[in-house]
Amino acid sequence: MSSLNNLAQSVIAGNVDQVKEQVKSLISSGTDPVEIVNQGLIAGMNVVGARFKAGDMYVPEVLMSARSMSSGLELVKPLIAEKDIQSRGKVVIGTVKADLHDIGKNLVSMMMQSGGLEVIDIGIDAAPEKFVEAVREHNPDIVGMSALLTTTMPAMKDTIELLEEEGLRDKVKVIIGGAPVSQEFATSIGADGYAPDAATATDLCKEMVAAK
């Protein structure tokens, strides 16, 4: 087990080169690729998520860990049949119209992917129409919206209203997040959930998918 544990430790440390080396060596020694993902890469990222939630790790460190995990994932993915990777649901995520912040959104996206969710990131400055298009095209379980400016928060409400008008609102759960956003605001615009940080957002999505 130690080599998978070592891989998890390298992910926690955010050491991209080490993660790549260890993944290559595990692959060449015949370790099951699914085990490399679950017991090495994701196991490490789970620790990172818990530490981040507890305030023991900060955004730059978490991003480094997430990058190292992604670099390992790229090496393993071609070896795994899609059916073997258990998707825990599909999430369309984006920063709302007129808001150009993406560090938080990228962090949420990485944490969700490490939690086994399939993420479709539609980027920043995403108009309500763009969210609607993505829901039509990808048929996700959840739509996640981020805003970091108080001035762009109303775009979240506009997006939910457009989903309603287009008859898509009942098909998806909507969660929102970002510095100025609160549970009260989420309730007031008719969102299904609010998450104060990336780890919570990931847990919330998993719960929502499981409850479907």
Image (cartoon, rainbow, N blue to C red):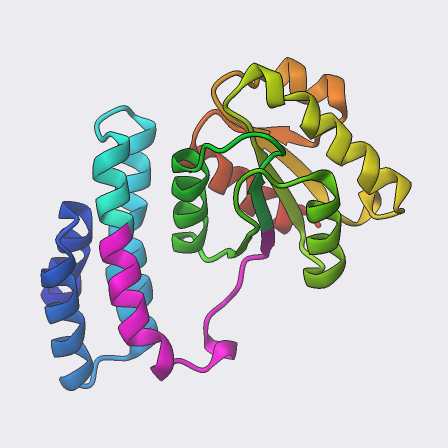
- Magenta span: 67-91
Report the side of 53 relative to 60 (left or right).
right
Q: Position of residue 175 (x, y in %)?
A: 62, 35
Report the side of 119 relative to 27 (left or right).
right
Q: Is residue 85 magenta?
A: yes
At horizontal 22% and vertical 31% (from top left) the residue drawn is: 57
Q: Answer above or below: position of 181 versus 68.
A: above
Q: Position of residue 201 (x, y in %)?
A: 50, 36
Q: Quadrant of the N terminus?
A: bottom left
Q: Main secondary structure of the magenta part?
A: helix
Q: Position of residue 90 (x, y in %)?
A: 60, 56
Q: Answer above or below: position of 192 versus 110.
A: above
Q: Is residue 185 magenta?
A: no
Q: Name the quadrant containing residue 97.
A: top right
In the image, 95 versus 9, the foreground residue is 95
Q: Position of residue 31 (x, y in %)?
A: 22, 80
